[in-house]
Image (spheres, helix red, strand yellow):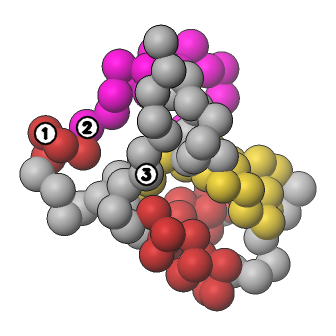
Amino acid sequence: MSYAKRTDGNHKEVVEEFRKVMPEASLFDASGAGKGFPDLVIGWQGKNYLFEVKDPAKYPSARSLTDAQKEFHLAWHGQVHVIHSAAEIAATLARLAMK
């Protein structure tokens, strides 16, 4: 069975804003990958980060992870961050860089 790939309503805004505020980072939009794979892959300072974009304008129940996303997060032996804005991505990267 095939499903249409949907992105959250703020997805495009998050991508555009992040590219403006952190041009030194690379961003790959993987939202069409399916099977629960996170929306964004960001390369920064020699490391890769996975981000799942959720829309804060939606009710909490409507912005929860899908079953496929939950399965991916549980099976993945690395980090995946759920964010709502480009500012959250930048803050996450800054926090992780301090470790």
Left or right of 47 in this view: 39: left
Report the residue at 62% width, 86% height from top: 21
Q: Which residue is mark 3?
A: 7
Task: Give the extent of the magenta segment.
Answer: 64-81
User: Which one is nearer the viewer's eye here, 30 or 96?
Assistant: 30
Marks 2 and 3 sit apart, C-alpha to C-alpha, by 13 Å
Secondary element type, mark 1: helix
Residue 89: assigned label:
none
* Label total for image: 3
Q: Residues within 10 Å of mark 2 (few under 14, many from 20)?
A: some
Please state which amino acid type lies under the numbered disc 2: Ser
Report the residue at 66% width, 55% height from top: 29
Secondary element type, mark 3: loop
Q: Which residue is mark 1?
A: 61
Magenta segment includes 75? yes
Please state which amino acid type lies under the numbered disc 3: Thr
Q: Residues within 10 Å of mark 3 (few under 14, many from 20)?
A: some
Give the vertical position of 35 relative to 47 (above or below).
Answer: above
Report the residue at 18% width, 43% height from top: 62
Q: Which residue is mark 2?
A: 64
